[in-house]
Amino acid sequence: MKPSRLMLLTAVAVIVPMAPALSAGAAADDATRPQLAIEDPGFENGGTGWTFGPGTGVGTGNSHGGARFLYLDAGAGKSAELTVVAPRKGSYDLSAWIGSAGTGGTYTVRRNGETVETITLPERRSYARYTVSGVELKGGDRLEIAFGSGSAWVNVDDLMISPAAPADPKVTSSDPEVVEMFAWAKKKANSWVQLPGTVGPINVDEYQTGGTGTAQYGPSYWAGYANRSAYYSRDMTHQLAGAHILGLDTENRTMLRSYASSATAEHKYFPVWALNFDAKTYLSIDYKSPDNFVREVPAVFELVEKAGQAYLWTGDRRYVDDPVLWDFYRHATEEFIDLHNSAKPNGDVEVAEGTGNGIFAGAASYNEQDGDGLAEAGDGIAAQYQAYLALATLARGKGDTALARTYDKRAADLKAYYNDEWSGTGSGADMVRAYTTSNTPVTGWGKENSVFVPMKQILDPGPRNDAYLDYIQEQELGPEGSPNIESTTYLPDMFFKNNRNDTAWTWMKKIYEQRELQHINSSQGPNGDYPEVSFTLVGQTVEGLMGIAPDAVNHRVTTQSRLPAGMKWLQTADVPIGKNTITVRHDGATKSTLTNNARKDAYSWEARFPGVHKKITVDGVPQHVRTKTVGGVTYTYATPTVRAGKTAVVQVTD
């Protein structure tokens, strides 16, 4: 059925709260230079600049965002095209949301008249996102974007230009599925990156599809629903590692800093839940006033934890020297807890609490369906534990060893309290996973407030941890498993961190296999177009399967093979760490190879192998056998120094 034709759109101006501006130099220099831009990417101005052939135009009634979209009627030979002159050299990813009632439609990108790539569209009536990646342009080049008709109508909306990823990690393996998965995830994740300097709408949501105005976007990427013009703290923190692996460190730092800036005394040190892509304006659907905005306790602590993770990946001293970030870390682990700790007594330790009155009043858990009535939840206390450890790491980076010792002790005390008292004495379904505002313990299945407990490793290794992992797996595979792919993306992380490699890999494959299924949010498109899916698959390949743990600050890296049964070998090449990249290969669980691609910096490499082995060699030379136990698992390990441009091989035998 042909959509209705062009209609007028009335924009209503409103006053929206704004976070403090980023300091000079926090945004990328590119934001002030002429950028490649599509003048009317959502066709809200009638398709300014487009050339429409017969049977094509701008309509209303089936848009992805806003009120309008590009349509092509059924039948061969119909096309609509746009030509943009590149203002300067660059490499770009070009994305568009497209729905098609039949087959044979096309999405084509040309450079100076020559085809770069043509995507032949499948039949998919609901919108999905398609990307042409790595389009190299020089200043003055003509970029041509064209859509062609097929056997039935084709609808197009919300075009987007992303800068090509700064890093280009590569995966090779004996298993072709992991190679395919990583290539898809890498391409899809980078397609969500905003081009700094782009002028786009703000406060777009399902109720304000046209937004409330425009702003210049900062370095950022989509983290949350695609029908909202913002990134969300919960999503962003989970996507951070994958973003770093793609080289998106400026984006990570800008987004973290925007949250830090929003965690004011007026907000009782809660950061806001979502910011528009200008990295300043609070997203209006989630922010009404300083005492009426969405906030969830785990996010406060995850932001601190992930800042520590970003510091270890990059070695960037701004994570410890920037006063805005540093003040946030301290407020989050001091005043924030003091201000939100009244319902449940916790003896000599403090545990941050929610109000039990819903997300706009402050929820204890990420599980929004279970958050009402809860004061403390497993994901909150587990995230608080990791925030303490992260602040100890950041304090060492700042040179404050006394503060680092303080937070190491707080972490240890909180973990002991959790295991000895807070979690009760039960196991599996009987283990306590939350407390109500009346201090009543809650057991059973809590989704995020169950999953985060072993994922954040606050639960001691041993029988209770093993039983809880079994229980979570049973629940997730049963009728109570989450229908939301966002929740499912945490499962590989949880199982990898608890050395259940086969189970973690099974969940990675399941998430990948479900990428074409419709997301539960109809405006989101398929599951694969939920940004967290692609970003986390990138991170789970490197941090999970390869077990790469960085310490760029001290020029160290740890690896641990977590290859599942049947995967003979896996290599990740050109993984960024600090200002360097490394290439790591695991052959099963007995041989690891690391290449230091730096020009001058040496790296100390701790190569871990599960189990106690009789012999360990470095480059074929026998070493004194050393073992250690971490998280209840005993490893045989070696720590060779790998000089710039060199390769080392560590192997164990029995």
Image (tube, rainbow, N blue to C red):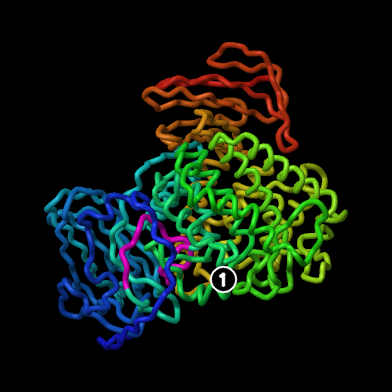
Q: Residue furthest right?
A: 425
- Is residue 497 positioned above or below 10 on the image? above
The percent coordinates of residue 607 (x first, y second) are: 59, 26
Taking the magenta stretch, the answer to whether it contains residue 219 is yes
Decide if residue 502 is in sight here. Answer: no
Give the image quarter of residue 205.
Answer: bottom left
Quadrant of image for the N terminus? bottom left
The percent coordinates of residue 38 (x first, y second) are: 23, 65
Residue at 26% across, 49% down: 91
Q: Amino acid at mark 1?
A: Val
Give the image quarter of residue 400.
Answer: top right
Other residues around mark 1 within 10 Å, as few (<14) / some (14–19) / many (≥20):
many
- Is residue 57 positioned above or below 115 on the image? below
Residue at 68% across, 49% down: 385
- Looking at this view, is 509 or 346 the one in front? 346
Give the image quarter of residue 98.
Answer: bottom left
Residue at 24% across, 77% down: 75
The residue to which callout 1 is attached is: 294
The percent coordinates of residue 202 (x first, y second) are: 37, 71
Residue at 16% across, 62% down: 84
Q: Which residues are magenta?
A: 214-231
- Looking at this view, is 479 or 643 the one in front? 643
